[in-house]
Structures are given as structure tokens and as C-alpha cells.
Image (cartoon, rainbow, N blue to C red):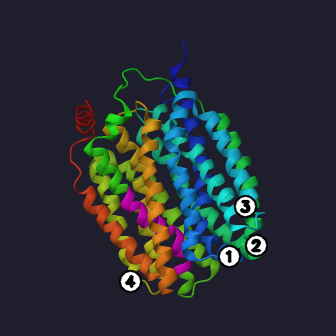
Amino acid sequence: MPDHRTSGIDSLRAWRVCFAAFVEAFVIFGVSYSFGVFLKPMALTFGAGHALMSTLFATLTVLSFFLSPVTGDLADRYGPKLMVASGAVLLAAGLILSAHVYSFPLLFLTYGVGVGGGVACIYLPSVAAVGEWFKVYRDIALGIAVSRIGLGTLVAAPVAAILIDKYDWRTCLEIYGWASIALLLPCAALLAQPPQAPGKSQIGIRQKVATRRFGLLYLGRMLAGIAIYISYVYLPAFAEDIGASHVAAASLVGYIGASSIVGRIGMNAVAPRFGQIATYRMTFVMLLVSFAFWLTAHSYVRLAIFSVIMGVGYGGLVALTPAVAVALFGTAGLGELLGVLYTVLGVACLIGPPLAGVIVDRTNDYRGPVAVATLAALAALIVVMRRPTASPQQDSASALKESA
């Protein structure tokens, strides 16, 4: 008989899986969320406008999350190890090839499809594995696993700015490509097929997705995602427009990443005391408050305040989403369910940054995108306030009843 203290749910092996997911999130989101640092130098090289450059980022993000139902289902069937190893190769190849292309349409293939496909193969299978490897410590494990998204942003964005200033954006991408595969492949080796917990619900994914609860969860995340992605793409350019240096502007993205670590771990830690739904709502309140600071910002200090508040709210939102999904719908088919849910991030990125880019191209003013982001954050808060206030256990039972 296996020793469940070392091989089963909440075991030492489970914590190794959590560590692997932790490093993987650091790499993939450090790379993808540093796009705002590459925006101006890439646009100058290819002679592209803000709307077109935003479409490049949208392509990456849309593929990252629209492929998630497929990669999540494959991970449920065959385990996360193969998916993450494949994603590591695809991500590194996309970055390295992007450093050597001179055609903007080809950049869509190497950067948008390559990097986006790599993220899709890595993130969702890793997060789902953590959710299924834990029961008692699930919330804190999920918070730890996704906390390195913030750390990745904290490190990768300023480092990218330094490398671009010292060399150029092409060299920076190539360095990031080789570093990514060196970190991701060992992490893939640490992953394993989650043990099958007894008593899992057999309710189909379609029935769960058809519930009103899932619809509200999806809509709220979409509106919040519009606001968040606009900030990642346009915050550095906005800061430079009011006089900040390239490195200082990139550091604002790092501040978001650093403070999001507090949100990811802290919000999950307080959720058992105040309730997951109430804590989840609080993250949306923090997002709206933060965008009020950006909307009225005329100094770097005010932008830094925005970054910190937004980071805490955003970090808590990201960390609580998988836990709320588990509370509402259980762990059966979690990879596929989260894959469907995370398509919302692709939708948000497809709407937010390109719309903001059109506004900037027409007005030559970065405050238009800030107004759009603020309205989206307000609408998101209104939506999540309509969610039921039942306990997680009641939420789960009700969701399954609706699905029957």
C-alpha cells in the first residue's frame, strides 16, 4: 500500500507539484506580461500603430486561454507532464524565432501563436494539477502556485527594459527564450498525474457551464480582465508620456507583480475567515479604487499607488478564481472546467487592448484607455455584487442541483 503522506493528496509529492507550478507561472507570465515594455521598440521597428501592436498581444492571450479547454482536457486524460514539456519547447521556440523575424505578419505566428500556445500548454494543466493534488491545503497551495505570476512580472519587466536599453528587444527575446526552456523542462519532470479522489462528482462540464452561477463568474472576470489587460499594455507608455524613463515606466508593471503576490497569498489566507464570495468581491472593489487613482494621475507617484492597489486586487482575483470554481462545481473535470472559464481572459484581451489602441491612434492621448478600463472595472463590480452570498458548501450543492 502506498504511503499517502508522501504520495497522495496533501502529501510531500503534492507540494513538489505546487513548487513546479509556482516556477512555471513565474516564467510564462513574466514573459507574456512584459509585453508593454516591448510595445514601443517593436512598434518602431515594424512601423506598426498601437492598435496593431495591441492585436499582437491579444493574439498571444487569446490563444493562451482559448486553447485551455483543449490542453486542460488532455491534461485530465494523460497527465500534465507531457503538456508542460511540450509547452516549454513551443514557448522557447516562439521567443527565439521572434527575435529573428523581420516581417510583422510572421511575428504574429512566432510570437502570438508560439508564445500563446506555449502558455496554454503550461498554465492551466499546472493549476488544475495543484487543485487536484490538495484538499485540506488547497486554497493556500493554489495561492502559492499562482503567486509567482506576480514575482515573474516583478522581475521580468524591469530586466527586459534593462536588456532592451543595453542591447535591443531582439536580444532580450532570445535570452528569455533560452532561459524559459532551461527553467520549464525540469519543472515538467516534477509534475505527475493527480491521484483520483473518491466521491468526485460526475456532473458533466456542459451542465456546469450552463448554470447562472458560471455565467456571472464568466462575465465578471471578462470585465475585470479588460481593465487589467489595458493596464499591462498601456501603463508603461502612459508613464513615459508624462516623463518617466523607460526603466521607471517598466518598473510600474513590476510593482503590480510585487503587490499581486500579497493579494494572491493574503486573499486566499483571509478567505476562510470572511468567506470566499465576500473576499472575491473585495478584490473587485480594490480594482475599481485603483483605477480611480490612474484616471486622475499626473505624477509617477500616483501611478505607483495605482500599481500597488491594482496589484493586490488583481492578485487576489487570480488566486481566488480557481478556489471559487472548485467550491461551486467540485474537482471533477477541473482542468476542462477551468479551461472553459479561462477563455474569458482571451475574450477580455481581444476586446480591451485593441479598443484602447484605436483610441490612442485617433486621439494621441493615453487617457482614453484609462477611462475604458475604469468603466470596465465598475461594470465588473456591479456584476459580482449580484452573486449569491451563500457559503462555499452551499454554493457547491446549489450549483450541482442546478446542473442536475
- The amino acid type, in three-letter code, at marker 4 is Thr
Which label's residue is closer to the chain start, 1 or 2? 1
Q: Which mark is residue 98?
A: 3
**Position of 112 compared to 269: left or right?**
right
Q: Does the stretch in magenta take in 236?
A: yes
The first of marks 1 and 4 along the sequence is 1
Q: Is residue 15 visible?
A: yes
| Viewer can see residue 365 | no
- Assign a secondary structure to mark 2: loop
Q: Separation of disc 1 and disc 2 at Cα?
A: 8 Å
The x, y position of residue 76, in whole percent, is 51, 31
Quadrant of the rendered structure where residue 156 is?
Answer: bottom right
Q: Is residue 163 magenta?
A: no
Q: Which residue is mark 2?
A: 168
Residue drawn at x 35%, y 65% as measured from the top left: 286
Query: Residue lying farthest top?
Result: 1
- Evaluate if marks 4 and 3 touch, with contact meaning CB atoms under 8 Å apart: no
**Which residue is disc 1 drawn over?**
41
Q: Amino acid at mark 2?
A: Asp
* Mark 4 nearby-residue class (10 Å; few <14, some 14–19, many ≥20): few
Between marks 2 and 3, how big is the CA–CA gap?
Answer: 13 Å
